[in-house]
Amino acid sequence: MSYDRYEALYLLRNSSAQTLDIGDYESEPSENNAFQECLNWARRHWRCLQIKKLPSYRYNPEIRRSNQTFCSVCLENFELNQTVRKLGCSHEFHSQCVDKWLNLKATCPLCRTAPL
């Protein structure tokens, strides 16, 4: 059974992108590369969407939301009005730092729990 790009995207859209595997679908060897490319794109896109759903806020040192005052990824202090993202484990980071981290590794940089 072979799939064109639109059929592959339909399958990806209607399945959990994390659980799909290329071995789940029969295809010709030459079609595996295109399907694998679509599958990888869907996983990256799904991860980006999940990262953007994580809670974030504008940092204000006068309003304490936690005891954390610096980003453990870049080791810089949080500054007024910087966007801080809070993971499910309650660790906080600059959103731009942790977003890059989570795109590479789907775990908290400190405790290694999976926030996605």
Image: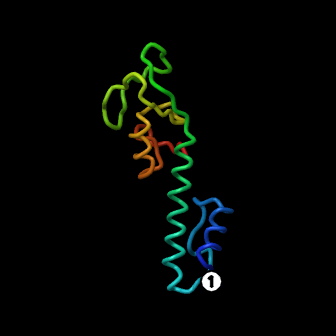
Outermost residue to the top: 62
Establish if 87 lies above or below 23. above
For mark 1, what is the residue?
2
Picture quadrant where residue 20 is located: bottom right
Establish if 69 lies above or below 109. above
**What residue is at 49 percent from the left and 42 percent from the top?**
113
Which percent across, then down, holds residue 60?
A: 44, 19
Establish if 107 lies above or below 74. below
Which percent across, then down, holds residue 57?
A: 51, 28
Residue type pointed to by label 1: Ser
Q: Residues within 10 Å of mark 1 (few under 14, many from 20)?
A: few
Which percent across, then down, holds residue 86?
A: 50, 32
| The N terminus: image quadrant | bottom right
Which percent across, then down, holds residue 94?
A: 41, 34
Q: Secondary structure at mark 1?
A: loop
**What residue is at 48 percent from the left and 77 percent from the top?**
33
**What residue is at 57 percent from the left and 75 percent from the top?**
23
**What residue is at 41 percent from the left and 40 percent from the top?**
96
* Side of 4 where 36 appears, left or right: left
Outermost residue to the right: 14
